[in-house]
Amino acid sequence: MTQRQVLQVFEHYQQSRLQFVQTVADLATRPQNIETLQNAGVMTLLRPLLLDSVPNVQQTAALALGRLANHSDDLAEAVVQGDILPQLVHSLASQNRFYKKAAAFVLRAVAKHSPGLALAVVACGGVDALVLSLEEFDPGVKEAAAWALGYVARHNEQLSQCVVEAGAVPLLVLCLQEPEMALKRISASALSDIAKHTTELAHSVVDNGAIAHLAQMILNPDAKLKRHVLSALSQISKHSVGLAELVVEAEVFPAALACLRDPDDYVKKNVTTLMREVVKHTPELAQFIVNCGGMAAVVDYLGDSSGNVRLPGIMMLGYVAAHTENLAMAVIVAKGVPQLALCLSEEREDHMRAAAAWALGQIGRHTPEHARAVAAASLLPALLQLYLDANSSEDLQVKCKKALKSVLQKCTHLPALEPLLYEAPSNILKHVLCQFSKVLPHDSKARRLFVTSGGLKKMQEMDAEPGSAMQEYIMVINNCYPEEIVRFYSPGYSEVLLERAEKFLPG
């Protein structure tokens, strides 16, 4: 065999290997091919090609493995069991940028599925190698590394702590300042995944100066970047008053409110999530958001949206109202009650309706004036209906029951209470009668209306246990009327009158 023939054999072998890994990488993009590839033992065939002498073969083999591992946790587990990760991690330090991106993709694809698989990435030194890749010149390598680190950190506190201890945070903050948009997005997302677990982890992000850089990007025209930036600021704010104050001090508001007009639903949702996480801490922070125009903006947002994107806005109103009478009144003045009423009636998901019920309870629980604002919107019968509906989830029933009790204990607007006399079970009815027993002794017009509307007659038909609070309220109400009126509307009194009529002898 001549030298030329030998070279042709090697060239053919090289082309065959390259064609093989390219074909597998292409097939792995289509879910219907995955099982066939797995059954053919493709993992075993790809592993030695990671050490191939031809860089293109190495890179494409790594890409194919990443696509397979990305498909399911079973295939990701097969990558781990095949002892492929240490090989990838070892090569990350010495190979070219194309291989590094492919290797980081494999680590990300494995880590995303479960804490156990992410821990396997940590155990093989993957996090340390990825952190080193954040210092690479090539932005594509940095992006791939940041993405993988975010997938490791998102699972739990322990894994996030591993990422922090490896020195990722200051490098991710530096990546935020790079000009490449994709790198900014992924870095903000990774910082969000790190900060979300605990106050300490959030502080590790804040202490490296992340807030200032994130705040500068709130009005960036790129919607995806704004999503991640707002998410990161939310995850930082949620843990403590101090962290929320640091976000506010970075002059995030009122600039963030402009994002509520963004066409991207997730940008708008993340703005309201950020506001929710800020206002929940103290009345002062809630008042600050109200003063910035946040209340009116969120109420308008609820009117223009539907579905799950409404949830943080609903909860934001509830948190504001929960703090003080004045803040609850600010929600009422901003027409928050009608919007929450729409959410309660329009949304079909029980967790959405439960949130709306909870928020309405927070608004109405302060004073009779607050309770009247909720009751006048015909919300008491709506809450009662959801509470009694057997198809309502347990959480929805609990939230409606609590909201009803909170509002009823303050409500003195009797026309709104009267419909409940005919439908409410005894555990709710006693709160309704309690309010009537407070108002009727001092209001002659209300006493007359209670008779003419049929309320007094309905009350006489109620079966209250002797010595119960409900019986006491009935006695107080009955004492507001002459005895003959009470007897007249009591069950069986018409028969007594008829019997007397029969026995009556005309003179």
Image (cartoon, rainbow, N blue to C red):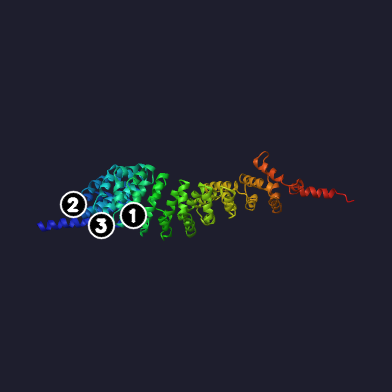
- In the rendered image, which residue does mark 3 sit on? 22
In primary-sequence order, the first of circles 3 and 1 is: 3
In-image side of 491 versus 91 (left or right): right
Q: How much space separates mark 2 and mark 1, taking CA atoms?
A: 35 Å
Nearest to the observer: residue 95 or residue 287 = 287
- In the rendered image, which residue does mark 2 sit on? 53
Question: What kind of residue is marked 2?
Answer: Ser
How far across and how far down the image is residue 175, in percent? Answer: 29, 52
At 88% across and 49% down in the image, what residue appears? 505
Q: Secondary structure at mark 1?
A: helix
In-image side of 349 versus 212 (left or right): right
Mark 3 surroundings: few (<14), some (14-19) or many (≥20) residues within 10 A? some
Nearest to the observer: residue 319 or residue 473 = 319
Between circles 2 and 1, the one closer to the viewer is 1
Label disc, if present, on residue 493 of the rendered structure? none
- Residue 463, image quadrant: top right
- In the rendered image, which residue does mark 1 sit on? 185
How far across and how far down the image is residue 43, in percent? Answer: 28, 50
Question: What kind of residue is marked 1?
Answer: Arg
Question: What kind of residue is marked 3?
Answer: Gln
In primary-sequence order, the first of circles 2 and 1 is: 2
Q: Secondary structure at mark 2?
A: loop
- Residue 178, image quadrant: bottom left
Residues under numbered marks 2 and 1 in contact, where contact means CB atoms less than 8 Å apart? no
Mark 2 surroundings: few (<14), some (14-19) or many (≥20) residues within 10 A? few
Q: How much space separates mark 3 and mark 1, taking CA atoms?
A: 29 Å
In-image side of 424 versus 394 (left or right): right
Nearest to the observer: residue 481 or residue 118 = 481
Looking at the image, residue 420 lies above or below residue 467: below
